[in-house]
Structures are given as structure tokens and as C-alpha cells.
Image (cartoon, rainbow, N blue to C red):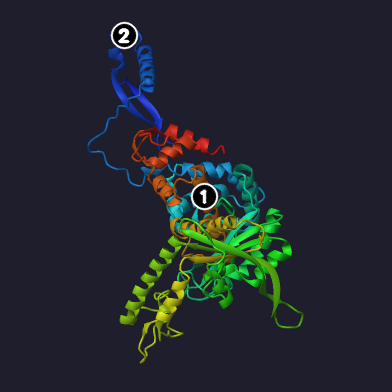
Amino acid sequence: MFLRKSFNKKSGRTYLTIVHGYRDQFGKSKSKTVKSIGYLDELEKEYSDPIKHFTQVAKEMDKERTDNEYLTLQIHSNEKIQKGTGNRKNYGHIVFSKIYHELELNRFFNNKRRHENFKYNTDSIMRLLLFCRLLYPASKKKTLELKDWFFDNFNFSLDDVYNSLSHFHETSTDLLRHLHDKIVEQYDRETSLVYYDVTNYYFEIDKEDELRKKGFSKEGRRSPIVQMGLALDRSGIPITYKLFKGNTHDSETYLPAMSDIKKEYGVDRIIVVADKGLNSGDNIAFNTVLGDGYIFSKSIRGADEEFKAYVLDEKGYIEGNDYKMKSRVIPAEINVTVKQVGKKKSKKKVQVDQKQVIFYSEKYAQRSKRKREELLAKAADLIANPAKYNKATSYGAAGYVKNLDFDKETCEIKETSQLRFIDTERIQEEEKYDGYYAIVTSELDELDSNIINAYRGLWKIEESFKITKSTLGARPVYLSRDDHINAHFLICFLALTIARLTEIRLKNRYPFSRIVESLRSVSCTHIDQNLFVFDYDDEITVDLNNVFNFNFGKKFMTLAQIKKNLASSKKG
């Protein structure tokens, strides 16, 4: 607070007021009259030196204000909201800012920018794209419109955002290596065990191009897609990703993805855990030649009769409370692709030693039964109301219906004079194997329980795909240029990594979907001068505050306090 002396030229008189100076939420200097004192000439009749006296009064009032834990606000009952001022701001992104700067991503982008001709700030652009992807996923245009929701000064244009995508694409390999090094350093990453799986993302376009091809969509859509292979470490933290054409089979992504990991991250020997879609002769041979290992699931219902008989034979099982398991090491035949110059590719049978682990769980059996009952209910409705369904919407249930055929062009159900009915033989065959699953592995001497536990960790990658597609809103993708598409998935990958690290910092007590709900709610409203009021707190923010100490839970904070906390988050 200070004493303001206002001289009026017309009257020739000076008026004294005590004023509180502050900066508003945009950093602009503002002032507010706290106390009107009076005209100087009249005050001189009462005080020998009014200016000296009231200057001291202002200092004492300011000290009392700073020492006092209570705030006094003067609110005009008819005051209007100032349009376009961004009174509401998110504060929860400070957690992501802290992890971002701990990983020194700001330093990476600033170093890369030094050697470029463009003037826009790629670090600033990446932070906005990441904060919005984590909290308010939207298009790049919408993301820019949300920049005033944050306390950071994001000063760039939409053209700058799109231009930066090309730069992000060009530096993506170096960025992923930088990220890996920091996670090894800060989180003791260990890559002897790698989880790998493939999913796809659709585009709102009709025509295919070189990258976006029509293939087997995980969501049953007919739009062009891209395939993405994702690798995680033992803790569920992403290691890397790789994009493939939409018509690439899952198993064909394995060799190039694993080759990149070995090359880029200096891994000597890895054991790859993957689902049955990656279980092919070529992939097993690839691992064997490089001296690496694998833990793959194996389809029981699609296996040969000898393997099915082994699964159902009670001999050899070790019983537990609600489970049983057994294993054997046998020479297994795999089909390996042989390439010869001037000749077509052919398949060659090769024999490898392989451990086969069979596990039965009563809980898994009940889950399989419930899932099938849901599909059978849908199949019954499909028979009664075929016009309601097409190839995509009948997915899963259609396999239980006899005499069901689809039009290749329209994917609609074809008319037929044959009676449609439930395939009871298929149901009876499936029921035999409810509760069983099989794993094949190169790790012949490893305990069965360790193999099973390692395979169970595959849920981490399935959950990562779910987070990326739902919470982070990675699809549909509206970009068209290949470099922009890769940059989009790079941003999603970074967001997923920060999401996983946030979960780990909270000791995996909460799923990321709950964490992000809380951090979205940790927002504040400007109420007066440079003061903001907060209106949300929960058990997650309490735990976050214990980890990061960002004053979560305080009902009031000044702009200075908020900016001090934000500055501390950028120290890494």
C-alpha cells in the first residue's frame, strides 16, 4: 500500500488517498483505493506534515495486511463479469509441468530450436499441446483456444502450432532416446522384460493413402486406419512406439519394432511378453536368432487336437485354491518364412525347444461364461432383428449364428431363405476350455509361476491403449500429412508417459482416469485484485500435495503465490 497524491489543475488542490497496488491475473499493474483521506490544504490544519504522517499510516496498513491471515474484500453487488478475461483457470496442470521439467523436455526442445530458423517457441507449444491432451483433449485449433485456461503465457499462433508438428516429427527419434535416458536415470528403468502389443486408430476420411489403409479395425470400423505398436517396460512406463500402414498384420510389426528397441536403446537381451496375435513362427525365430526370449499366449481352441488333449488331461496339474497349472518342455514345430533371390517367399518348418504352460482359473472360467452369455443374447436378437445389425455392429455375436452372411460391398446382412439359428456345437466346444489359457515361452528353466506372473502384466499395455484412446482422446485423427500424424502420436505418447509417471508418483493407488478428473477440477476463479478462490479438494489432491507440495487444498491464493508455485514446477 502507498500514499497517492492526486493534483487537480482546475481547483489547484491535492487530494490524498491510500492505495493498494497489485498486478491482475494478466500481469498488468492495477491499483485500488483502500482509504480516502482528504484535501492536503485542510489536513495541514490538523497535521504538521500530513504527507509524512499518512505515508507512515500506509506502511503500517500494508504491514497489517501482510501479517493478517484474514482478507477483507469489498464487492460491489452490481459488478458485472468482464467478458473475455478468462476468470476461470486450471491449476492442476502444475503436476504435469513438474514431471515435464523433471524429464528436462524443456531443455531438449530449447536446444533443438537453437539450430532452426523459426522464431516460435516449440517448448511452449509442446507444453500447451501436452497439458490439453492430458486434461482437455481436443483438436489443435480447439487446443489453442483453451490457452487462457492456464497461467502460462502461451503466445503463438495456430500456424506456429502446425509448423511445429513437422519439427516434432523430425526430432522424434532423438526425443524418445532423451526420454528413455531420463527415465532410466530417475526411475531406474529396467528393460530386460518388455511388453509389446498393437492397436489401431481410425481417421475421419473415406479414401486411403500410403499410410492410412483399410485394415482390421479393433473397433469394427470401415474407416482407414494406422497401426501402432507400443512397447512398455516392467513398470508399465512406455519405452517407444512405431507406426505402420493400416493394412499391416499385427505379427508383421514385431520384427521392426523389436529391432528398433535393440538398436536405439542398447538393450542386450530382452524377453518380450505379447498376446497370441504376435505369436508367429517368424517372430519366434527372430527372437531365437538374436538370443532374446519370448512369452506369448497361445490359442487353445485354434490349436491341434494333441495340444487340446494335453490341456484337458488332468494328469500333471498342480492344484491351488481356485486354480491349477502344469507345464512341459517339448520340441515344437514353427513355420518360418524363407526368402530366396528370384523366388517367391515360402514357409519352412523349423523345430525349436519350447516350454508350454497351462493355467486354469475358476474366476477366468466364470468371466468367459458371462462374456459368452452376453454375446449369445446379442446373437438371439440378431436372429430376431437382422435389420438392426451390420458386420461391424454384430461383431462377436455373429460367430454364434448359423446361416449368416454379409454383403461384401455394404456389409449389411444378406437376405436368405435358410433358417438362422444358434450354433450349439460351437458353444459346447468352447465350454470345454472355459478358464484355461496357454502360454509358450523360450524360458525353459523359469518357474511356471514366474512365467504366468510376467504374462499377467500384459494388462498394463491394454490399459495404456484404453487411456490413450479414451482419456487422452487420441482418435479420431483429423490430420492428413504423415509428419503431422506422427507428431500427433508422439504427443499422445508423451502424454501417456507423463500419465504413467503420475500414477507411479502416487504409488499406483489411483487409475489415471481418476487422477485427471481431480486435476481438471483443481481450478480457480479470479475474485478481486490478484486473488483467486479454489473450490475443489479430495483424497487424490491430498496425496498429490504430499508428493509435490503445490498448496492443493488452499481455498485462496494470490497470483504471486500461484506463480511462485508454477516457477518451482519448472525447476525440474
Identify the disc placed on residue 500. Answer: 1
Distance in Å between CA atoms under marks 2 and 1: 67 Å
Crowd class of label 2 (few under 14; some 14 to 19; many from 20; radius 10 Å): few
* Image quarter in which the N terminus is found: top left
Crowd class of label 1 (few under 14; some 14 to 19; many from 20; radius 10 Å): many
The location of residue 569, given as percent across then percent down, is: 52, 38
Residue at point 55% right, 45% down?
Answer: 100
Tag 2's secondary structure?
Answer: loop
Give the answer, above or below, for where 515 lies relative to 162: above
* Residue closer to the observer: 253 or 213: 253
Label 2 sits on what residue type? Answer: Tyr
Label 1 sits on what residue type? Answer: Arg
Tag 1's secondary structure?
Answer: helix
User: Which residue has dot 2 on it?
Assistant: 47
Residue at point 72% right, 77% down?
Answer: 338
Label located before the other in sequence (2 or 1): 2
The location of residue 512, given as percent across then percent down, is: 45, 50
Instruction: Let me know if residue 413 appears in the view.
Output: yes
The location of residue 186, given as percent across then percent down, is: 61, 42
Viewed as shown, does residue 307 lie left or right of 364? right
Quadrant of the rendered image containing residue 418: bottom left
Q: Nearer the viewer, mark 2 or mark 1?
A: 1
